Amino acid sequence: MSNAFDVIIAGGGVMGCATATYLLRAEPALKVAVIERDPTYARSSTVLSDGNTRLQFNLKENIQMSLYGLEVLGRFGDDLAVDGEQPDPGFRQQGNLFLIDADSETESREGLALQQALGCDVAWLEPGEIAERFPYASLDGCVGATFGRLDGTMSPYAVLQAYRRKAAALGAQFIQAEVGAITHADGRATGTRLATGEALQAGAVLNATGPWAARLAATAGIALPVRPIKRQVFIVDTDLRPEWILPAFFFPSGLYCIHEGEGRFMFGKSSTGSGSSAAGRVCMRSIRWTEMPSWASGPRSRACIWRMAFPGTAFNSATRWGGICPS
Ligand SMILES: Cc1cc2nc3c(=O)[nH]c(=O)nc-3n(C[C@H](O)[C@H](O)[C@H](O)COP(=O)(O)OP(=O)(O)OC[C@H]3O[C@@H](n4cnc5c(N)ncnc54)[C@H](O)[C@@H]3O)c2cc1C
């Protein structure tokens, strides 16, 4: 294996693989290496994520990126086909419903005006309309909602694998290794040093190590303001059997709920700060009791999978709890 590349991408999650794909599409002669330490992606944000995309942001750039994302998803199969095989990102546009309380109304209406000015299909719903169209949303303290019809959820694993396969087909070299440091001279990156001590040279290095990006950047003397935030996700099996897939509900507290199908709902929320898994469990209990809708926290509901992701640690559990109880 040659140790010299035009571009080294540290981290082979969705950002690393997508960047390799688009770089090689723009310039097929480039020698691109993607260095990923764990091909199972067990702790990568990409595969732990909920795969939801939305137009409902308050920042113009975020809205524009999401509009572009919808274009990409619209032609995903054609664009990322390899040997005639079209990948399916599993994109389901069930819509996102953001429930608004009095504290967030002004900000939400400002965001809505910006989204609509940029041509997004997002509408304001009064509480009566919400109750009529989406009877399962809990409306405590709700002054209205914004509904983005085109928002939806995809399979992050399928999207990652599609980019990884396409990048490899375009000539990217995937290396399974841990990048120990970014080497540099005169203020420019010169390559990477692997944890094994092996040196690889490159004209440019992309740090795509996600939650670990600040740690790797520090090896080049760069203080990167990237701070991982722990998020907890769990799936609840309920007695509810809606006739259609409900939109994803986003509550004012930050708790969200995505209908998986039949009676299964995924709940998630980011917590503030990091912490041990034990601290996380306590936090999760308080989430489900204070904010979950009654149909999801009744005595016959069962939380069956709990997932937690935060810097350097991810926890997956298939423990079946005896109902959602406060202790
Ligand atoms: C629970 C959860 C839910 C989420 N839900 C959503 C959502 O609904 N919508 C949304 O848009 N975003 C969501 N996100 C965020 C989204 O997942 C991330 O923004 C995205 O996946 C980041 O991709 P990435 O490639 O930068 O990072 P990652 O997927 O974490 O990839 C980084 C890779 O770098 C590798 N790596 C790290 N250090 C090294 C090293 N030194 N050497 C070699 N390899 C290294 C890791 O193994 C990893 O595979 C969610 C995140 C989480 C945790």
Image: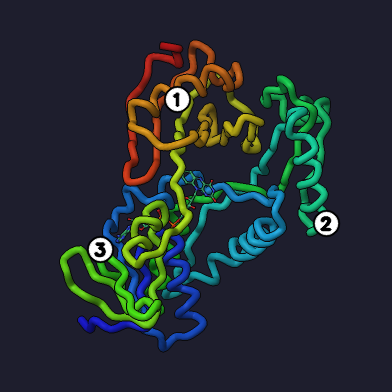
Apparent side of residue 7 relative to residue 153 in the rendered image (left or right):
left
* Figure colour scheme: rainbow
Q: Considering only vertical position in the picture, is 87 above or below 167?
A: above
Mark 2 lies on a secondary structure that is helix
Apparent side of residue 142 relative to residue 261 in the rendered image (left or right):
right
Mark 3 — residue? 180
- The residues bearing labels 1 and 2 have C-alpha atoms spaced at a distance of 39 Å
- Cβ of mark 3 under 8 Å from ligand 1: the answer is yes
Mark 3 lies on a secondary structure that is strand
Mark 2 — residue? 117
Q: Earlier in the sequence, mark 1 or mark 3?
A: 3
Task: Residue 242: name its quadrant.
Answer: top right
Percent position of residue 62, x then y: 65, 56
Query: How dense is the environment of label 2, judged by Cα within 10 Å: few (below 14), some, or many (20 and up)?
Result: few
The answer to whether residue 172 is seen in the rendering is no
Task: Residue 281: name its quadrant.
Answer: top left
Query: How dense is the environment of label 3, judged by Cα within 10 Å: few (below 14), some, or many (20 and up)?
Result: some
Q: Nearer the viewer, mark 1 or mark 2?
A: 1
Identify which residue, 4 or 188, lies in the foreground.
Answer: 188
- The residues bearing labels 1 and 3 have C-alpha atoms spaced at a distance of 34 Å
Mark 1 — residue? 283
Q: Earlier in the sequence, mark 1 or mark 2?
A: 2
Residue drawn 37% across the image and 26% down it:
279
Percent position of residue 74, x then y: 62, 63
Identify which residue, 306 or 182, lies in the foreground.
Answer: 182
Apparent side of residue 274 relative to residue 68 in the rendered image (left or right):
left
- The residues bearing labels 2 and 3 have C-alpha atoms spaced at a distance of 46 Å
